[in-house]
Image: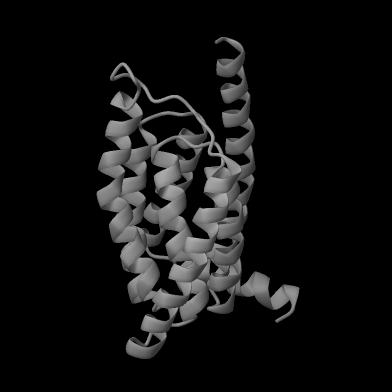
Amino acid sequence: MDTLSIGQAVAGQIANTGWPEWVAIGGAILYLVLAARESPWCWFWGIISCAFWAYVAYAEYALFVDALLQVFYVLISFWGLYAWLYGGQAHDALPISVLPLRSHVGIILAGLLLTLVVGYFFDQYTPAAATYPDAFTTVFSVIATFMVIYKKLENWLYWLVIDTVYLFLYGSRGGYLFVLLFVVYLVLAVVGYLRWRREFERNLNSI
């Protein structure tokens, strides 16, 4: 598909986008902006966005694994809100921290193995589209979400990879509006990483 055709497709999708999709998009952007600023309110907007995104992923794109992931996000966001407010050592706000390299090696290997298992299951037993890429984004999104909950700096790097895969995943399904959204996500992930790293280094130097 050439650039003009894609542009026309995006314009058509914008014109035909229903309010559930706009709520999902707006809430997701607010979630990321507030998360980059370490605001606990990000979790409220995450709940709103994911509830509507679950419907969109299931009903419009047949991405069943992703729809289940959004339901999981809604539930886990309440945990995230509590952790950010009271997860510190003194039952106060949780500070930003990092994981050692060996932890990332274990996380990535376990994530890839689980991707194969989940992808195989949905490939064999559901009519879901793009099962293995969908499984990859699902598994690693869950991992990255727990990293966000515990304010691990590297969560933003995981999201850079995940959002890149999502970009191609929705692009392959003709969801060009969501492709643009994930471009915005990628930019916000870079901003979030830089802000969190600066805050982490500031806290480290103040010890």
Q: Is residue 61 visible?
A: no
Vertical arrangement, residue 109 with respect to residue 195, above or below = below
Q: Position of residue 88 (x, y in %)?
A: 35, 23
Q: Position of residue 75 (x, y in %)?
A: 25, 51
- Quadrant of res 194: top right
Viewer-proximal residue, 177 or 142?
A: 142
Q: Quadrant of the N terminus?
A: bottom right
Vertical arrangement, residue 117 with respect to residue 102, above or below = below
Q: Does 151 sit left or right of 86 as displayed?
A: right
Residue depicted at x 48% and y 62%: 111
Q: Does 205 sit left or right of 91 as displayed?
A: right
Q: Position of residue 154 (x, y in %)?
A: 56, 42
- Quadrant of res 167: bottom right
Q: Quadrant of the C terminus?
A: top right
Q: Is residue 23 visible?
A: yes
Residue depicted at x 60% and y 37%: 193
Vertical arrangement, residue 59 with respect to residue 24, above or below = below
The number of numbered badges drawn on the structure is: 0
Viewer-proximal residue, 123 or 164?
A: 123
Residue depicted at x 33% and y 53%: 73
Q: Position of residue 65 (x, y in %)?
A: 37, 71
Residue depicted at x 39% and y 55%: 24
The residue furthest top is 206
Figure coloring = one colour
